[in-house]
Image (cartoon, grey):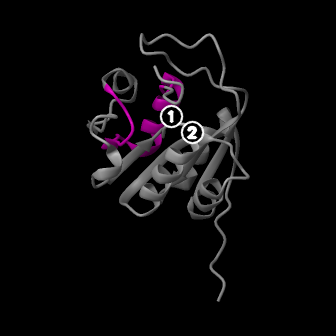
Amino acid sequence: MSNFEWYTPPFLADAARKVLGKIDLDPASCDEANKVVHAEKFFSLADDGLQHEWRGRIFLNPPFKRWLVDKFIDKLLCSDVDAAVALTNASTDSQWFQRLALRSDGVCFLTGRIKFLQPDGNASKLTAKNGCCVFYLGSDVELFFEVFQPLGLCTQFNLPTQC
């Protein structure tokens, strides 16, 4: 596992599926990670998910490298998605974070530090260096809050566009 690939723990993949119903696409994944996420389709590092079209219900746990996460967030925001759940660092000072926060219908700042999975499926012995959050883009924000409220502080940032 490279230093920027962190596989989603089951409790977060389960929560995402509860909100989305099912996951059509995970654009930043691999065979091992998809054993937990259960996306109908995924793009691996070799596939380069940034080069493909994203549609439907998306789960995104982007590579945690600044120059990559920025590109994955921009791709998500420009894609034709029915709904999306994105797991990211709580990098509130980053431009990508602020763009995503303002476009999201809901966000959950997760309580505690996540233990991501290793390629063998076991939880890492180390926790994430930073806090994490989950963004939701979609029409059922009430369901998102219901599912994610037990996991952290949920709120909304999307503000009406000003003329």
Check disc 2 and give the amino acid type.
Val
Q: Quadrant of residue 37?
A: top left
Q: Residues within 10 Å of mark 1 (few under 14, many from 20)?
A: some
Q: Quadrant of residue 39?
A: top left
Image location (x, y in percent) of residue 79: 37, 61
Which residue was labeled with disc 2? 147
Image location (x, y in percent) of residue 28: 39, 38
Which residue was labeled with disc 1? 15
Is residue 143 placed above or below 31 in the rendered structure? below
Instruction: Give the secondary structure at mark 1.
Output: helix
Is residue 64 placed above or below 117 in the rendered structure? below
Residue pushed farthest front? 67
At horizontal 55% and vertical 37% (from top left) the residue drawn is: 64
Check disc 1 and give the amino acid type.
Ala
Q: Which residues are magenta?
A: 7-30
Image location (x, y in percent) of residue 115: 61, 20
Instruction: Give the secondary structure at mark 2.
Output: helix
In this view, the residue in front, 84 or 122, is 122
Image location (x, y in percent) of residue 44: 32, 34
Q: Do the residues bearing badges 1 and 2 touch, measured as CB atoms within 8 Å?
A: yes
Residue pushed farthest bottom? 163
In this view, the residue in front, 29 or 55, is 29
Is residue 3 placed above or below 136 in the rendered structure? above
Residue 36 horizontal side relative to residue 41, left or right: right
Q: Quadrant of the C terminus?
A: bottom right
Q: Find out whether residue 22 is within the magenta segment.
A: yes
At horizontal 47% and vertical 25% (from top left) the residue drawn is: 7
Specify which label sits upstream in the sequence, 1 or 2: 1
| Cα–Cα gap, marks 1 and 2 | 6 Å
